[in-house]
Amino acid sequence: MNKRIALGWSLAGVVAVACSPDRLTTPAHDDGIFKESGIALDLIPPGQTIPFIPVATSATCTVGGRGGQQIVLPQGYIYSVVASEGPGFGNNADMHTMNEGGPNKGRFLYHTLESTPGGVSVTDLVTGVSRFLAQRADWERFDGIVWTPWNTILAAEEVNPSSRADPDVPQATAGLVYEIDPATGVATVRPALGAMAHEGIRVGADGNVYEGEDDGPGHIFKFVPDTKGDLSSGQLYALKITNDLGDRTGDAVWVPLDRTAVQVNANTEAIAKGATGYSAVEDVEIGSSTGDDHRGNHTIFAAISGEDRILAVNLNAHGSQDVVVSDYVRKGVNAPADFESPDNVALDRAGNLYITEDPGGSAPSKTLGDDVWFAPFDQHSAAPSLPIQRFFSITDCNAEPSGLYMSISNRTLFVHLQHRGGDGADLSLAIQRLPDVSFSRGKGN
């Protein structure tokens, strides 16, 4: 049976409660990392090419979920609810990150709030208590979030145009990035990273920041700080295909953008400089952000929601600094016909990619839940992936999965269920694999 942890919130009359004794983590070990139960999600059982038996079809869904069961998982996997926004709270928790460095590494789970006002909340995975870390009246719809190598948090607004001006950056006409101190919640605006409808955001091992933009058209950006670890100034670039091998794949370059113009609207500046546009760049991922041993710091994965595909942007193609863009996952190629609107992505340390979908819709017209997919890493070819498999499916017709995040131990995959029906509480789930599971090949779930 699925274990569940009930958790309220400490704002707007909702009381926070500690989680039950079967919580995900145990007390910190001497190395300061909080240990999770279960085994690594990328561990492949003997005789299988993927670490689970795929879920055969999308789940039949109802409003609020099927009898309290929120998702259908493969045999040997369980989920726990680690945070819940109670009725009326309405802050639509979206993306996740952990404290990947510093004291008590891996203990705290941070969430962006896709609401107005926007903000960042944090859940203590040991006590189960959640609270707001930072929120301001002028913040709008926070989406992307990432932990930096220098132990701060970057959180970004997904709006264009914006309706609530930041008093420190009044010229900005779209969403901004904020750098937040996780100890105090103090936020510093970082307009050099560009004003845009930010979606995914990641930091490479080299200190560069990679951003995806959900706009028409959307673009893929790279920010190179003038001084590594200092995001107050630097050069923003947008990706441009220079030798199109088909549907905006092929050789590419990073086009430098005007440093002043990007602080007004980076999307407008990218278009003016001839950058390549895609239909809704919903999320980006890079191997170094997850400690991936196969990818290193050389490949960006970008979810192109409006085109039913995931791009692989090789930053070090042919052993040089050349950039090459290719299709990594594409509907009708290595993804089935019911793979729709990829939204968020996360890597495990073996190089496998997890993908949420968000095709929209709700009950009563919608009868099948949204899915989360698994793109197996091909050891013999960096791109594309092996044929993707359905990892799990949501049982709530109104909910969408968002905020995929692989824990630093590689033992827990976090995901949000937004816009749930029934009691209206959006949930943050933690998915783990049980140890010593005997796998049956007879049928899926």
Image (cartoon, rainbow, N blue to C red):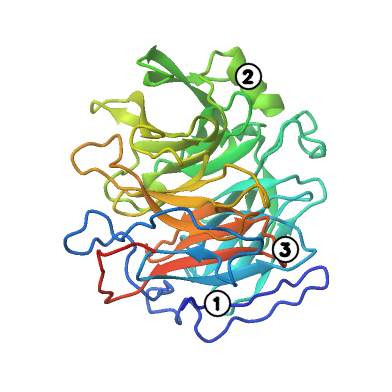
Residue at the spot x=25%, y=64% of the render? 441
> Relative to 280, is 349 on the left or the right?
left
Q: Position of residue 359 (x, y in %)?
A: 57, 42
Q: Amino acid at mark 1?
A: Arg
Q: Amino acid at mark 3?
A: Gly
Cα distance, mark 1 to mark 3? 17 Å
Q: Position of residue 85 (x, y in %)?
A: 70, 66
Q: Is residue 15 visible?
A: yes
Camera-side residue: 356 or 24?
A: 356
Q: Residues within 10 Å of mark 2 (few under 14, many from 20)?
A: many
**Label disc, if present, on residue 424 of the rendered structure:** 3
Give above or below for 115 relative to 72: above
Cα distance, mark 3 to mark 2? 40 Å
Residue underneath mark 2: 269
Residue underneath mark 1: 4
Give above or below for 394 relative to 159: below
Give above or below for 30 relative to 212: below
Which quadrant would residue 45 be assigned to in this image?
A: bottom left
Q: Position of residue 385 (x, y in %)?
A: 30, 40
Q: Is residue 155 visible?
A: no
Q: Residues within 10 Å of mark 3 (few under 14, many from 20)?
A: many
In the rendered image, the quadrant that contains the C terminus is: bottom left
